[in-house]
Image (cartoon, rainbow, N blue to C red):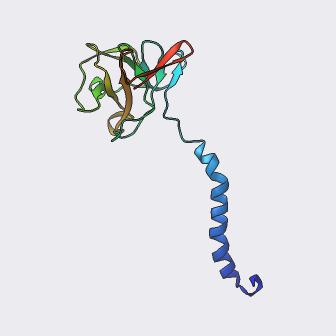
Amino acid sequence: MAKNLSKRAKFIIGVPIGAIFAGVLVLPFLLMLVPNPNPVKITSLANQRVGTYLDTGRGLYKLYPYSSSQANFPEGAPAAIEQPCVYIKYRQLDGLSSYGIYEYSSSQPVPVRKTIKSKSILQILPRGRLAPGLYYVTAARNGMFGGKDYFYFKVGSKDSKNTLLISRGSGYMLFL
């Protein structure tokens, strides 16, 4: 039957089948490029180029950037048991008003103290203790025309009935 088909018909049938076959072969490799939204524990900021980091009091974690606010709080967001501290490290920092911590449910800003640790590192520390709950950090991206990124984290307590504390080496992760 294939002998009865014209070259054009073979082309029209072959191209989509070939594209599907190529897609099936390439898809696993493309999925390996998708970033992992789970926090990564790091030892220090010294060997990091850029990013936003959460010091949970028991370890330093690199936060996953979201380019838009999330309607549902990300499940893999790290949690701090003690007073969290946020570090933002970029090649060049924007105006300080472009960075802050907000309550997730109300989007109300948390009063913070911002300290420039070096020309590329900004420390954001809440002025008071954060109540257990969900929070996010906003950080400017690529200057005044770049927009902002969102980074999510939780604050919990060891006493909370809805928390699960998991030891990871010398640090701890708390899942609410």
- Please indicate whether residue 170 sits to the left or right of residue 64 in the image: right
Residue drawn at (67%, 61%), measured in percent from left and top?
21
In this rendering, the answer to whether 12 lies above or below 48 is below
Residue drawn at (39%, 26%), measured in percent from left and top?
176
Closest to the observer, 65 or 88 = 65
Name, please, the residue furthest toward the front: 161
Q: Is residue 13 visible?
A: yes
Q: Position of residue 105 (x, y in %)?
A: 26, 33
Quadrant position of residue 94: top left
The N terminus lies in quadrant: bottom right
Closest to the observer, 162 or 150 = 162
Closest to the observer, 39 or 165 = 165
Residue drawn at (29%, 23%), measured in percent from left and top?
96
In this rendering, the answer to whether 137 lies above or below 171 is below
Quadrant position of residue 101: top left
Q: Position of residue 4 (x, y in %)?
A: 74, 87
Q: Is residue 45 visible?
A: no
In this rendering, the answer to whether 172 lies above or below 37 is above
Name, please, the residue furthest toward the right: 3
Q: Position of residue 22 (x, y in %)?
A: 66, 59
Quadrant position of residue 144: top left
Exactly how many numbered labels are in the figure?
0
Q: Position of residue 12 (x, y in %)?
A: 63, 76
Residue drawn at (49%, 27%), measured in percent from left and top?
39
